[in-house]
Image (cartoon, grey):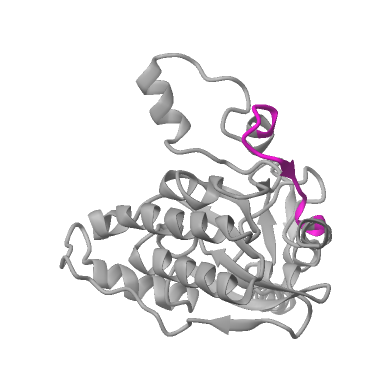
Amino acid sequence: MAWFRRKDKNIADLEKKDIPSGLWIKCPSCSEIQYKPELDKNHSVCRHCDHHFRVPPNIYRDIILDEDNAENLFSNVKSADPLKFKAGKKYTDQLDEAMSKTNQNDAVNCYSGNIHGQAIILGVMNFGFIGGSMGSVVGELISRCIDLAREKKLPFILVCASGGARMQESALSLMQLAKTSSKLARFQEEGGLYIPILTDPTTGGVTASSGMLGDVILAEPGALIGFAGPRVIKQTIGEDLPEGFQRAEFLQDKGFIDHIVPRENMKAVLSKMIGLLTS
């Protein structure tokens, strides 16, 4: 009998080991346990509370662009360390770690492709790469996208996700706000269509520049959007903040955002807007 008990225990241990990790994810909003393959089928949106999980750039590429139509742009551009920045960790080590973790060169990916047959230029920021921080490469790649869209007279769409400026690059990072803003101003003056999509989170320098300069500003449900964080603002003004402060719904109510679009509807809404605004 003891032999069978040991045998059963060994079988149970084997079964536990055979179960792959990462199959179940807890929703940070409603605490429901999500089966990852089903969550992936639903564009990483919780079926219980509609929470939009953060996703890497390739997910937005596949959602927005027509199938087998996307072409990577400027993929050879990488960050340097001109200031030889050191803190708890060298900046070069942070970059190497982020590149290895995300398999990306920096915090924005650029594509050309079509939306229902309509050609566009698409930029997608990656929060997983040092918090989507805007360094000199991010500003340069966004600028190149704008220049290409201007040259080819195509709409430019930017999926924003950022924790702010990349302070390891100091003033070089802050200069990207002016650089991207001036490029967008020229693009729009010449009749170019620019649509930013604000996802969770869009904060700091991106909000203060390209995130809020669109002809039409879209956002995903529940996205955190602002310049400084709620905790910093509360400490500064010494007052409690309104419910839902800095969330997409609050900003739409105050007129900062034009439309909140669920991820599954994003492509259809973009297609309709491009058709209306470029005809």
| x and y percentages locating residue 188 in the rendered image | 58, 56
Residue 245 lies in quadrant: top right
Give the percent coordinates (x, y) of residue 248.
65, 38
Q: Is residue 272 above or below residue 149?
A: above
Above or below 123: residue 254: above
Can residue 237 be found in the magenta stretch?
Answer: no
In depth, the one of 187 and 123 nearer the eye is 187
Q: Residue at x 41, y 63 (%)?
A: 139
Residue sitting farthest toward the top: 239
Pick the quarter of the image with the N terminus: bottom right
For the image, the number of numbered tags is 0
Which residue is depicted at the point 42% across and 65% down? 138
On screen, residue 205 versus residue 187, left or right, reads left
Residue 266, compared with residue 239, is above or below; it is below
Residue at coordinates 82% horizontally, 76% vertically from top-left? 117
Q: Which of the two residues, 113 or 226, is positioned nearer the viewer here? A: 113
Residue 210 in the image: state x and y as whole percent.
50, 52
Residue 38 shown left or right of residue 254 in the figure: right
Query: Residue shown at 75%/68% (left/top)?
Result: 63
Residue 279, located in which quarter of the rendered image?
bottom right
Residue range highlighted in magenta? 252-265
Image position, residue 234 (x, y; %)? 43, 22
Indicate left or right for 233 with 250 as reference. Answer: left
Q: Quadrant of residue 89?
A: bottom left
In this rendering, the answer to whether 167 lies above or below 231 is below
- The foreground one among 173 and 46 is 173
Tell which residue pokes out farthest to the front in this image. Answer: 190
Decide whether residue 257 is among the magenta residues: yes
Q: Is residue 188 left or right of residue 181?
A: right
